[in-house]
Amino acid sequence: MIPPDHPRYHSLVTRERLAKCMLQGIVSPEGLTAHGRGEAFDYFLGERTTDSALLAEKIAAALLLSAASPVISVNGNTAALAAGGIAELQRACGARVEVNLFHRTEERVRQIEDMLRRAGADVLSGPAERLLPLSHDRAWCRRDGMFSADVILVPLEDGDRCEALVGMGKSVIAIDLNPLSRTSRKATLTIVDELTRALPSITRACGILSEDERRSLLAGLDNHYLLSEAIREMTTRLSHALD
Amino acid sequence: MIPPDHPRYHSLVTRERLAKCMLQGIVSPEGLTAHGRGEAFDYFLGERTTDSALLAEKIAAALLLSAASPVISVNGNTAALAAGGIAELQRACGARVEVNLFHRTEERVRQIEDMLRRAGADVLSGPAERLLPLSHDRAWCRRDGMFSADVILVPLEDGDRCEALVGMGKSVIAIDLNPLSRTSRKATLTIVDELTRALPSITRACGILSEDERRSLLAGLDNHYLLSEAIREMTTRLSHALD
């Protein structure tokens, strides 16, 4: 039991939730280490949504709302951290929700789908096929999901799949706290923000953007600028950390 | 089986060892997350002992050698990563070794004590009491261990306990890859270096420092400078990352 007066309460509770989900089989052991790496980058950001991240979240909303077949791809960590946030974003933008796992087993897929449904999401079901140009289990997706999507939101994705999806001509929106990762560099749009801050922010933007604002945001999309700004925020914060 | 010529051999073997220790109950699932966080910070340091970290390690040796009752506090991650390194440092500086856990169970304490003994450490045993001014299980320690120590080395410690120990008038040496953590800021001396590099480095210094050198190192202890230098190393690497 973590005492609520602990200064790192939120962070500790999150870790505890991920640990519990690992014991249930929803999160992989590798997912725990990956989460820890994300935490370190979030320290550098000051654990807040920066101006450039907020801009990226608005552009993400514009991309999702303008898409013909948007898909939100969910893995174990995403479901464990933000199943409710995924359901709300789905309601706001009308995207399909599809479970795709790096460490894939049918049992894990089913568990994560159940978790998302309990949180109110409408989850794509039916048989998956090996449709992506990737070796092994990461090739799996559904024909009416990721495979036919034009815009895909991939929170916490690995670099290989991000690159493969971009190579298939899709617009890929990544949520990744590491602005130096391959995912961040390969994505069409990278949101350098923590998942449980990023999702509600995209959802809010979906509810308020006018069609003119969307067009203007899409015209201004410059991912290199967004990544540079994230790195600049981190270095600025770090260099003043002890002032 | 990880091939020894893999460029990430050391890092992958370390993760594998931690995962194995988690299955045995020695490392907590939260310990895996904490390790991932350390990995990200170490990446920014260039996975090497910086000049300022080496200086901190020499000062740590001077503090331990000059102490009346030095104690090394060991948790699950520390034992899993460096039980042998703890035993060697104990031989070099004569400190007591005491197991203190954030996620405390008697069974885990016993397992970790056994692991340390197998690695050659002389581990403090006997009953623990709630002696530290903390609200949860971290209040536990031994009267002839942490409680009566004047200098305590806490590798991978949490901020609450670090602060409580400093508040009790003790000199606290932290090993923490995050120069912004509360532990790093509250400690008397912070070594911003990876555990398995830091421990042998302190042990080496114990073997070669003259009494004059020790005095001079202690007189020059400036933790703010050491943290600034660690941050400067990280910002320099980050700011050139997109070049």
Image (cartoon, coloured by chain):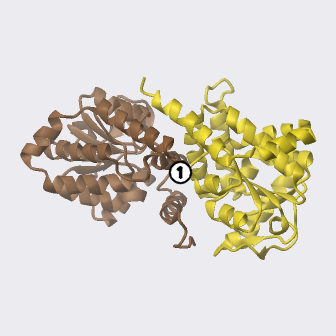
Chain colours: A brown, B yellow
Residue placed at 30% from the left, 32% from the top? A225
Q: Position of residue A14 (x, y in %)?
A: 48, 61
Residue placed at 24% from the left, 28% from the top? A169
* Secondary structure type for disc 1: helix
- Which corner quadrant of the image does residue A222 belong to? top left
Is residue B100 depicted above or below B121 in this figure? Answer: below
Q: Nearer the viewer, residue A185 or A106?
A: A185
Disc tally is 1
Q: Position of residue A205 (x, y in %)?
A: 20, 53
Q: Nearer the viewer, residue A221 or A174?
A: A221
Residue placed at 61% from the left, 39% from the top? B230
Q: Do we see residue B198 in this rendering?
A: no
Q: Is residue B47 left or right of residue A74?
A: right
Q: Nearer the viewer, residue A97 or B159?
A: B159
In which quadrant will I find the C terminus of chain B? top left
Q: Residues within 10 Å of mark 1 (few under 14, many from 20)?
A: many
Is residue B100 depicted above or below A72 in this figure? Answer: below
Q: Do we see residue B50 in this rendering?
A: yes
- The chain containing the residue under callout 1 comes to A
Q: Is residue B131 left or right of residue B235?
A: right
Q: Amino acid at mark 1?
A: Leu
Q: Which residue is mark 1?
A: A32
